[in-house]
Image (cartoon, coloured by chain):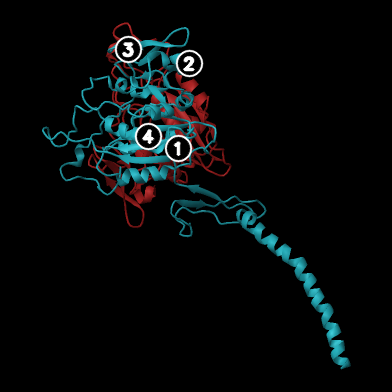
Chain colours: A cyan, B red
Amino acid sequence: NEELWVQSVLEMPKRRDILAIVLIVLPWTLLITVWHQSTIAPLLAVHKDDGGDSRRDLAAGLDSKEYCLSDRDIVEVVRTEYVYTRPPPWSDTLPTIHVITPTYSRPVQKAELTRLANTLLHVPNLHWILVEDSQRRTPLITRLLRDTGLNYTHLNVETPRNYKLRGDTRDPRIPRGTMQRNLALRWLRETFNKNSSQPGIVYFADDDNTYSLELFEEMRSTRKVSVWPVAFVGGLRYESPKVNAAGKVYGWKTVFDPHRPFAIDMAGFAVNLRLILARSQAYFKLRGVKGGYQESSLLRELVTLSDLEPKAANCTKILVWHTRTEKPVLVNEGKKGFTDPNVEI
Amino acid sequence: YVYSRPPPWSDTLPTIFVITPTYTRPVQKAELTRLANTFLHVQNLHWVVVEDSPRRTNLVSNLLEKAGLNFTHLNVETPKSLKLGLSWIPSHTPRGTLQRNLGLHWLRNSFSNSAPPEGVVYFADDDNTYSLELFEEMRYTRRVSVWPVAFVGGLRYESPKVSPEGKVVGWKTVFDPNRPFAIDMAGFAISIKLILEKPQASFKLEGVKGGYQETSLLKDLVTMDGLEPKAANCTKVLVWHTRTERPTLVNEGKRGFTDPRVEV
């Protein structure tokens, strides 16, 4: 009995000790685990990257490059991501700019949309509505939009072909892009509630024009319809609204038909979303529109001349250029094609 | 107004020196604007813009200042043929040559061969289209890296031929595939180290056959089997040789309609 009693007395302090040790050590173990994950990883010394080194980890879209410094230096593990940079963080206070871009398949399409996306990726609170002139949404566009990281909506509607002419031509009486822009307007009207206060601006941006970043900030404050000069339209260096001393638009500085109700290019105006939703029947006229009157066909249902808000320093600065891209020469493809058609351009 | 800033400079990423020759014409500002909009996404990019002009113009100076990019602004004028036809630069000097060479010259003056910076040189014309992925592909070039280019040589794209071992063994082109380097200006990048190691390597000014300009530089830098294929072993197109139409300005008439002080 005595031995047993002695044994149990000896055991009890042991248990207490163990408990004490556990209570002291456990928090430190947890702490070290957390540290390890966040801090230690970048501090691991690594081997020098050697181009064709098979140890290089090439996960989809990620490439890690590692540099070797002395053991005492802190080494930074640099990761490069292949996908587009994300757009700027969304802000709760900035009105959203809904950019409507009609597009159609042709060799330079991917190039155009790539460089357009590279511009749009700088603009906060931008929503890109891309409308394909096609029977179905194409994989090229689907992939491109997803890879940009932009906030987007992908639509499509095919402009009917004129069967009387050679099969490939679209109906020449419908200006290009009209049905696509109208579809986007319809989508906006179906998506946004007229009574909700989500501020937004609608801008029609063709995929071959060139846009400065400043332009998007100018249009963001549009109350009804804002206007500004556009370069390389109407056979001029630029066309521009005429603005009087009181800051009101009273005419159009154009050579071609300056008496149009709105002698302005598609890229030269933006409309407040509220107005688009309020005038829900306002669309671009599909047929019977004289050359140069497409913009008027929409704007006359939305606003009068005196309501226009001039931007770009009272319409004295050029912030958008109506550039056009040459059709590439593909003669050497020959009849059967030289390049691999599976390689997307 | 909002001017975008490039991503913060990193002390460990190799620098990409982009050399862009440019010249005054109506679409110049538009081209440089959208080019800048692309470059503003690329980390550690240094833009070397070389004007073909007797003086650096205000248009380009102001654009570079406002863009927020790291830049160097140079200029050199391509001499025009004298009226008598006694040109010392024959008419078949490809455009941009003197300007690209000046860019290389600036690099060699700015950096020492004994302590070369980590980085690459890339020749980017102001009317082409570049994906962001392209710059990450070229960033770790050891000597000279290559990849396909769209819309050159009368094809959808031209491309280096890459063997299963990952070596360049030829050129998939219709136009003169037997050129030593049947590749477009936009289809390769050279490590700074190599540029500094071979200070005599420049684009040839005179007597260059059409399509041989790139060869005139690359032959002094590398051999075909030393090329590093990028873009998934040259199966992806990451750069397009787009060209911009000349705008119609007929309505300006003889005396000009628009205000010439408004910069386009």
Contact check, label 1 and label 3, Cβ < 8 Å:
no
Tag 3: amino acid: Thr
| Front tag of 3 and 4 | 4
Crowd around label 2: few <14 · some 14–19 · many ≥20 (10 Å): few
Secondary structure at badge 1 equals strand
Mark 1 lies on residue: B121
Same-subunit check for callouts 2 and 3: yes
| Front tag of 1 and 2 | 2
Q: Which of the two labelled residues, at mark 2 and mark 3, occupies the earlier sequence position?
A: 3
Nearest the eye: A301 or A61: A301
**Residue A169 position (above or below residue B87):** below
Same-subunit check for callouts 2 and 4: yes
Q: CA distance from mark 2 to mark 3?
A: 19 Å
Same-subunit check for callouts 3 and 4: yes
Secondary structure at badge 3 equals loop
Q: CA distance from mark 4 to mark 1?
A: 49 Å
Residue A158: percent from left, percent from top: 24, 38
Question: Please, which chain is the residue tagged with disc 2 on?
Answer: A
Residue at x-position 34% and y-position 9%: B257
Crowd around label 1: few <14 · some 14–19 · many ≥20 (10 Å): many
Q: CA distance from mark 3 to mark 4?
A: 33 Å
Mark 2 lies on residue: A313
Mark 3 lies on residue: A254
Mark 4 lies on residue: A189
Q: Which of the two labelled residues, at mark 2 and mark 4, occupies the earlier sequence position?
A: 4
Q: Which mark is residue A233?
A: none
